[in-house]
Image: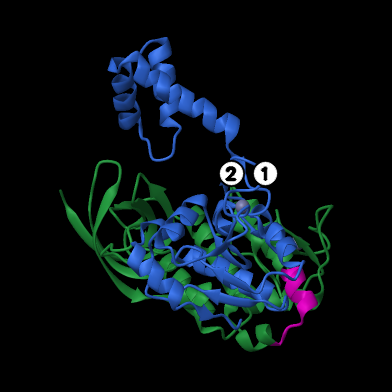
């Protein structure tokens, strides 16, 4: 059976039988992969903690008909340790991993998504920014990578120069007075600025934002995400916002 | 596909945790060939467990009465509560004979990706037990994996202002595994060396 080796981020695990787990991971070069880790739940397992969600690993598997099998794992970065000691960061990480599952396809390379997730997990573990901001930045950029970049300045429909006052999820973000569909919301200008900063990586502006605009921004990001993902992201409900 | 009753049995067995379609089929044919008395004994055990066994009102462990045998035992130390995820973890810790206090079974770990938050576990019941002021120490013995660790983080933060000593089982438990698979010596040592959590 063919062997392969890749870098990967563990997205999720499921118990299988007595002591095994199915590991869902996002690999750097071959998209999402599911593989069995045999005996991983036994405390003397040679895999140890290397196959926990959020771990960045160098993994070797052999391909199976339905499921691959993990044969070797080395840790590249164990962000999970630090993240699990900060509850807000951990709930944010859960939402990221779940989003990555939904935005990726099995065996379809998505290196940009992989790098984005690895970077966001590192940022969470370093505790340099509010976990909720790191999460929203990740969600916005993941949507952009998937081809659904929201607009926070020019009109998402006709392209008219912004800034605009209205926001409409279905239209793709900011909308001008002429395009504005009924039921559009009117977030604060600071919220538009915050979301644009998160999308472009302007952390000075994002870190200086106030709580009211962060909350409003998170609401818009969540609405945007749920609109594009068929199944919705369950973890979002449990994310602890400051 | 098999006919009627056999397929029904395979389907039911296949819904059990850890039983795949192949195992379900193997168990079904084992039962078909087994003595009638053996099968009757299994049926009785299944019926009895649903009829007689319930969950302890206080700690959430499996019990045959309102209180489980540990909560009802006055020789146990009722000032100390060990918090675990599942009833099988109680069994694992009891095997070590290191712990003479009582337990609190959460019913799992916090897992946002599975839609399980603090409100879906027996966290509120734990806080109610602490309200009387009798409890001095809470030992958090969730599984030594990231979900268990994050659940411990959440609980220690919640318990910070309650005025009890909060401890976590010592490291030395290999991370990534299930608590129930830890051998008695390792688990016992983890109990002795439990460390205070200053969240
Ligand atoms: Zn327009
Ligand atoms: Zn009890």
Does B152 sit above or below residue A204? above
Does A177 sit above or below residue B42? below
The chain coloured green is A
Residue at the extreme left of the image, as rendered: A1
The residues bearing labels 2 and 1 have C-alpha atoms spaced at a distance of 7 Å
Q: Write down the residue under mark 2.
A: B63
Q: Is mark 1 on a helix, strand or loop?
A: loop
| B36 and A216: which is toward the camera | B36
Q: Residue A71: percent from the left, percent from the top? A: 22, 59
Q: Which residue is drawn at 67% across and 68% down?
A: A240
| B83 and B11: which is toward the camera | B83
Quadrant, the C terminus of chain B = bottom right
* Labelled pair 2, 1 in contact (Cβ < 8 Å): yes
Stretch of the chain drawn in magenta: A208-217
Residue at the extreme top of the image, as rendered: B3
* Residue A24 visible from this viewpoint: yes
Q: Write down the residue under mark 1.
A: B66
Q: Residue A32 lies in what quarter of the image?
A: bottom left
Tell whether circle 2 marks a residue whose Cβ is less than 8 angstroms from ligand 2. Answer: yes
Q: For mark 1, name the chain.
A: B
Residue A91's tag is: none
């Amino acid at each position: 059976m063919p062997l392969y080796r890749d870098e990967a981020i563990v997205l999720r695990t499921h118990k299988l039988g007595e002591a095994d787990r199915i590991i869902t991971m996002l690999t750097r070069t071959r998209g999402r992969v599911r593989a069995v880790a045999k005996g991983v739940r036994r405390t003397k397992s040679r895999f140890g903690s290397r196959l926990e969600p959020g771990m960045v690993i160098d993994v070797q598997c052999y391909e199976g008909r339905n499921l691959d099998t993990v044969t070797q794992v080395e840790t590249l970065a164990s962000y999970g340790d630090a993240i699990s000691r900060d509850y807000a960061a951990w709930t944010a990480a859960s939402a990221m991993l779940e989003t990555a599952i939904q935005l990726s396809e099995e065996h379809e390379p998505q290196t940009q998504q992989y790098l984005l997730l690895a970077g966001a997990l590192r940022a969470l573990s370093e505790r340099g920014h509010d976990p909720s901001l790191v999460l929203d930045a990740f969600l916005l950029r993941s949507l952009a990578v998937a081809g659904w970049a929201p607009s926070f300045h020019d009109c998402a429909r006709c392209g008219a120069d912004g800034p605009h006052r209205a926001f409409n999820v279905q239209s793709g973000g900011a909308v001008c007075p002429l395009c504005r569909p009924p039921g559009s919301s009117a977030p604060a200008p600071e919220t538009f600025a915050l979301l644009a900063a998160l999308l472009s990586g302007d952390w000075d502006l994002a870190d200086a934002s106030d709580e009211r605009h962060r909350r409003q921004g998170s609401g818009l990001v969540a609405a945007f995400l749920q609109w594009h993902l068929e199944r919705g992201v369950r973890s979002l409900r449990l994310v602890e916002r400051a | 596909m098999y006919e009627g009753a056999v397929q029904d049995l395979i389907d039911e067995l296949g819904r059990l945790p850890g039983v795949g379609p192949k195992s379900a089929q193997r168990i079904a044919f084992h039962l078909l060939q087994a003595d009638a008395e053996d099968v009757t004994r299994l049926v009785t055990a299944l019926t009895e467990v649903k009829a007689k066994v319930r969950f302890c009102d206080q700690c959430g462990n499996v019990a045959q009465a309102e209180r489980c045998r540990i909560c009802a035992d006055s020789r146990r130390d009722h000032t100390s509560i060990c918090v675990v995820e599942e009833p099988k973890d109680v069994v694992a810790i009891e095997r070590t004979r290191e712990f003479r206090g009582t337990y609190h079974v959460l019913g799992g770990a916090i897992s946002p990706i599975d839609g399980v938050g603090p409100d879906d576990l027996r966290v509120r019941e734990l806080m109610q037990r602490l309200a009387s002021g009798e409890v001095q120490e809470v030992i958090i013995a969730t599984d030594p994996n990231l979900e268990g660790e994050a659940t411990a983080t959440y609980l220690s933060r919640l318990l910070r202002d309650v005025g009890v000593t909060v401890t976590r089982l010592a490291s030395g438990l290999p991370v990534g595994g299930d608590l129930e698979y830890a051998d008695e010596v390792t688990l016992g040592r983890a109990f002795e060396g439990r460390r205070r959590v200053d969240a």
